[in-house]
Image (cartoon, rainbow, N blue to C red):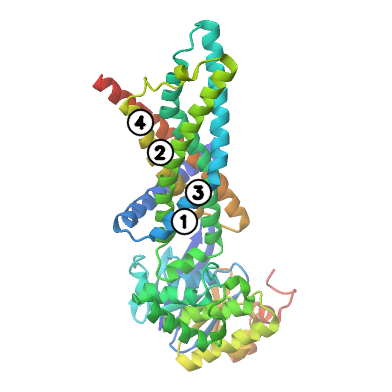
Amino acid sequence: MIALTQLLGAQTIWLFEQFLGLRSLFWRTVASLLRRRFRRSEVIEHAYNFANKSLLFLFVTMGFVGMIMVFQACFQAQRLLGDMTLIGPAFLQLVIREFAPTIGGLMIATRVGAGIAAEIGSMNVTEQIDALRMNGADPVDHLVAPRILAGVVTMLSLGIFGALFMFLVGGVTAKAAFSVPYSTFFNMGLIKPLDVMSFLNKCVVYGFVIPLVAAHAGFVARGGSEGVGSATTRSVIECSLWILMFDLGIGAFYFILQRAIG
Amino acid sequence: MIRFEHIKKSFGEKVVLDDVSFDIPKGRVQFVIGMSGTGKSVLMKHLVGLLKPDSGDVWLDGENITRLTEREFYRVRKKCGMVFQHSTLFDSMTILENIAMPIRKHFALDSKAANARAMEALELVHLGKEAKRLPPELGAGVRKRAAIARALALKPDYLIYDEPTTALDPIAARRIDGLIREMSDKTGVTSLVVSHDVRSIFAISDSVAFLYRSKLQFLGTPAELKATTDPIVKQFINGLSQGPIT
């Protein structure tokens, strides 16, 4: 019993310390962004790399999820209602509110977040971050701020393209498997401005959170290659958890706002 | 002068430094030696604020630098260059750019002025011809010399070498030893060398501190080190497998 209490206590302290570390990195990054202490060319370079590396992976995932969702929705609608006129508009609403930003975010956390954690983690264990500090360079300006701006740009652009692709694949699936006409499926009638706001909000938040959490995992990596491996795993798990928490929070906020507006 | 006063440092439950105190006068080549994991590099990192002690104080030229902030440490890092164990040159930059970077950052110079000063530092370590090459194109010994040039480019008063001869072949290692002594004699820089290379100690050091089990076990000149009767120190410098060190 004492051992269990000690373990829980140690885990709680560890979690609290990690949270404080992440909070400190967040504020240092905000300061760096506000003072524009980073190089713009690095932002462009990272955005190009993040987006290019993730594009195919994201489209394949979005395409399959779109096909599966539309197939199941059409199947159930045909069986229970016999009417599939609302499948397209309802699917688009779901894509914009949930699937495109959140599934996209989870995929980018896997692809880009893991890469950032591995890169910063290996720089950390080989003392390159110490070397940066000795050179008078702030690691946050050089390693975190440009990646965060690049993350926001990547998340927004891939979120939009991912949503369009998912909707397109859904429409083709509905037509091919259930003969739903394109004119019926590709209907944006249910989309409200707040849905688009929620989508953009989630993309920006995830684009910020993924590089931040991944960079923090890299900064706290210890030891050799084992430490880098742990940082990578940790980054994917923590990014995914933060994305799901923000998904719930932002979703709930817009739901309440929608009801308040009426 | 550098003064370490009752330095204690732990990582989790592992005590790395336990009440370590000694002074390093200016102009010396001071070696800090000991077994792997005895806190030699950790001690040196306290001097430039890469690590902070759990307790104790670090003094540099009469100033207590223990509680300085990261930004305040920038001026300390101008005074104290550091050559890391793995050289830590940035692979995407040429040797010249690597050396010009800290000059630009610390002295806010434009690229032309920073490059000129970087070139001077490269000439000092006889690497002028390699300025335009990338680090991966060079051997470990040459990269180490470039790392020394990067530290020297700031014209520091103190230069910390973290295991400068580790992973080098014997010829490259002796060349690095020669360079450390040469830089100390030429520029008057105080050199702090973390090492377990016994040949280097007797070839170039003015003073030696030996750390054992997180504590300072010995402090003296190379001649005193050679003459010591301390069985732990004797076992280490003679590289014996049998003895009190297990």
Residue bearing mark 2: A203
The CA distance from mark 2 to mark 4 is 11 Å
The C terminus of chain B: image quadrant: bottom right
Q: Earlier in the sequence, mark 2 or mark 3?
A: 3
Task: Assess whether mark 4 and mark 3 are in contact (beta carbons under 8 angstroms).
Answer: no
Q: Earlier in the sequence, mark 2 or mark 1?
A: 1
Q: Please, what secondary structure does the residue beneath circle 2 have?
A: helix
Which circle marks residue A50 in the picture?
3
Q: Residue at x 58, y 58 (%)?
A: A223
Inspect this view and state whether residue A37 appears: yes
Residue bearing mark 4: A196
Mark 1 belongs to chain: A
| Identity, as a three-letter code, of the amino acid under mark 1 | Glu
Mark 4 belongs to chain: A
Q: Residue at x 44, y 34 (%)?
A: A101
Q: Position of residue B210 (x, y in %)?
A: 57, 78
| Identity, as a three-letter code, of the amino acid under mark 2 | Cys
Residue bearing mark 1: A45
The CA distance from mark 3 to mark 4 is 23 Å
